[in-house]
Image (tube, rainbow, N blue to C red):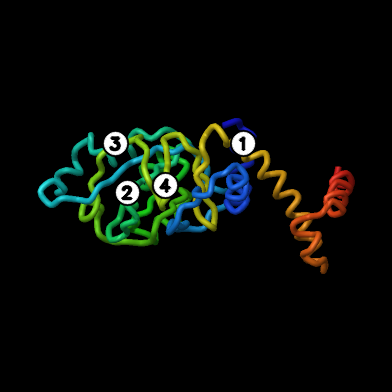
Amino acid sequence: MKPETLATLRRVSTATLTTQMFKRGFRNVFMQGVRALGSYGDNMVGPATTVRNIPAREDIDVMASLGNPEHPQRKAVETIKPGHVLVMDCRGDARAASGGDILMTRLMRREAAGVVTDGGIRDAGPIAKMPLPVFCAGPSAPLNIIQHHAVEIDAPIACGGVAVYPGDILVGDADGVVVLPAHLADDVAADAAAQEELEAFLLARIDAGAPLPGTYPPNQATLAAFEEWKARQG
C-alpha cells in the first residue's frame, strides 16, 4: 500500500468500502458474525497473516501441544510482521476461544495491526481495553484446543464467510471487517475518500430538509452544486 492509502483506509468506513467493492463486482467482502471487541479510534488496517484451523481431536490437541514452538498458532503470533493483521479461520465456531490476553499482549508487543477471528476470544474484558484492535464472534472462555486444531500459516482461508488470502488488506471499524485484494487497495481507497466527500455534502442537504429524489442518489443538478461547494471549500 501507498502511505496515503493506509492513511485513507484508517478513516473511511467499511460501509463505503463495501460500496466501492460492489462497483467492482465484489459482493462477498464483509465478514459475517465478526465484530469489534472493544471501542477503537482509527480503523484497523493491515495485510493479512492467516492461520487455518480444523476441528480438534482429543488424542492430538492436549496441553503439551501448546508448548511446541512450531505450533502454527503460536508460531504465527511469534513471527507476525509489524503492521500485519492476524486472521484466524475458526470455521465460525465460537464454542472455544481462539486466543486470550497473553497472546493478544504478545501480538501487541510484536506491533501487529490487529486480530480477526470468526471464533471466540477469552479474557474478553481485559482485551477490550487494549489498544490492539480485536474482532471476533464474541467472548468465549474455553481454551482453543477444545474445538480448534491449527494446521497451517499463510494459506488461503475462510473467515466470517469471506475468502482471505495472505496479504489481503483487512479494514475493521464499528460495523465489522472488510477484505480488500491488495492489488485493488490503492484505487479503492482513493474512490472511497471521494465517495465520502460527496456523501458528507448529500447528508448535509438531507439534514437541511432536501428530499431523497434527486439528492440521494444525486442528479446532475445536485452534482453541479457539489462541485460548486467543493470550489468554495478550496
Q: Earlier in the sequence, mark 4 or mark 3?
A: 3
Disc 1 residue type (three-letter): Thr
50 vs 173, left or right, is left
Disc 2 residue type (three-letter): Ile
Q: Which residue is mark 4?
A: 115
Distance in Å between CA atoms under marks 4 and 3: 15 Å
- Do tag 1 and tag 3 residues touch (Cβ < 8 Å)? no
Using the image, tell me which numbered label, if any, was put on residue 140.
none
* Residue 50, x across and y down, in percent: 37, 39
Distance in Å between CA atoms under marks 1 and 4: 20 Å
* Residue 9, x across and y down, in percent: 60, 43
Disc 3 residue type (three-letter): Lys
* Residue 181, x across and y down, in percent: 51, 37
Looking at the image, is mark 2 or mark 4 nearer the viewer? 4
Query: What is the secondary structure assignment of the residue under circle 1?
Result: helix
Q: Label 2: how many residues lie within 10 Å, few (<14), some (14-19) or many (20+)?
A: few
In front here: 117 or 102?
A: 117
Distance in Å between CA atoms under marks 3 and 2: 14 Å
Query: What is the secondary structure assignment of the residue under circle 4?
Result: strand
Q: Label 4: how many residues lie within 10 Å, few (<14), some (14-19) or many (20+)?
A: many
Q: Earlier in the sequence, mark 2 or mark 4?
A: 2
Q: Label 1: how many residues lie within 10 Å, few (<14), some (14-19) or many (20+)?
A: some
Q: Earlier in the sequence, mark 1 or mark 3?
A: 1
Q: Which residue is depicted at the point 54% across and 32% down?
A: 183
Using the image, tell me which numbered label, if any, was put on residue 5.
1
Using the image, tell me which numbered label, if any, was put on residue 75.
3
**Residue found at the far bottom of this picture:** 209
127 vs 61, left or right, is right
